Image (spheres, rainbow, N blue to C red):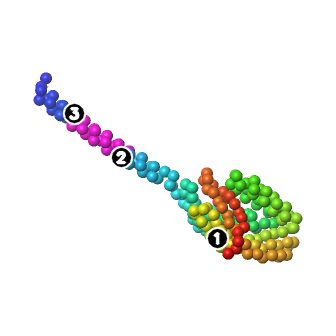
Amino acid sequence: MNLTAARQDLGHLRTAGQLQRLVIVLLSATTLVCAMCLYAVLGRERTVLVPPVIEKSFWVQHDKVSASYLEQMASFMAYLVLDTSPHAVDWKGRLLLQYAAPKDAPAFQQKLGVEATRVKQLNATTVYSIKGLAPDEKTMSVRMSGTLATYVNDQRVSDVAKAYRLKFTYTGNRILLQSFEEVEEK
């Protein structure tokens, strides 16, 4: 056995061991940095959607939606609730209940039933013309103002300025209506 060769081999093994330790430390640091980046990004993805009728694009995030999405949903809900006729009131009510938050659906169903009966008995039609929408992303609500025209037997009987506040919730990648209430016109 050659003592010089053994010492050289031992030196090479020590150098290789130190190099391996350095690589392990670098890989561990890289893994830690990747884990921290993943944690920072997790739940903060933002999906940009374009509605079927391109009016405005909007985004949805983990538990928030954009103001333009709230505006478009408020307009749609106003169409379902405030633009009524004896022939369409039932199917619009069923469609609205699909967008109602589960805990609020029974209250909506009761109000829609009363409204449907009233519309059919009077042979009334209502049309709501939106003048302004004021969305609030933080509270997920929209204040809507406009004019509600009422027709009974094809005769216009009233034209009243009315304002409404719609409150939404965004859960399970769906926006749901929590409340639709009349507020004072400013």
Q: Position of residue 12 (x, y in %)?
A: 19, 34
Magenta portion: prevailing SS class: helix
| 82 horizontally vs 21: left or right | right
Circle nearer the viewer, 3 or 2: 2
| 59 horizontally vs 32: left or right | right
Q: Secondary structure at mark 3?
A: helix
Disc 2 target residue: 30
**Residue at 34% across / 43% down in the picture?**
27
Q: Earlier in the sequence, mark 2 or mark 1?
A: 2
Total marks drawn? 3
What quarter of the picture does the C terminus occupy?
A: bottom right
Task: Specify the amino acid type for callout 1.
Answer: Leu
Magenta segment includes 21: yes
Disc 1 target residue: 133
**Residue at 75% across / 73% down in the picture?**
148
Q: Position of residue 131 (x, y in %)?
A: 67, 74
Q: Secondary structure at mark 2?
A: helix
Q: Earlier in the sequence, mark 3 or mark 2?
A: 3
What are the residue bounds of the magenta stretch? 13-31
Task: Specify the amino acid type for callout 2.
Answer: Thr
**Residue at 63% across / 63% down in the picture?**
141
Residue in the foreground of this view, choosing between 145 and 96? 145
C-alpha distance separating marks 3 and 2: 25 Å
Q: Position of residue 89 (x, y in %)?
A: 80, 62
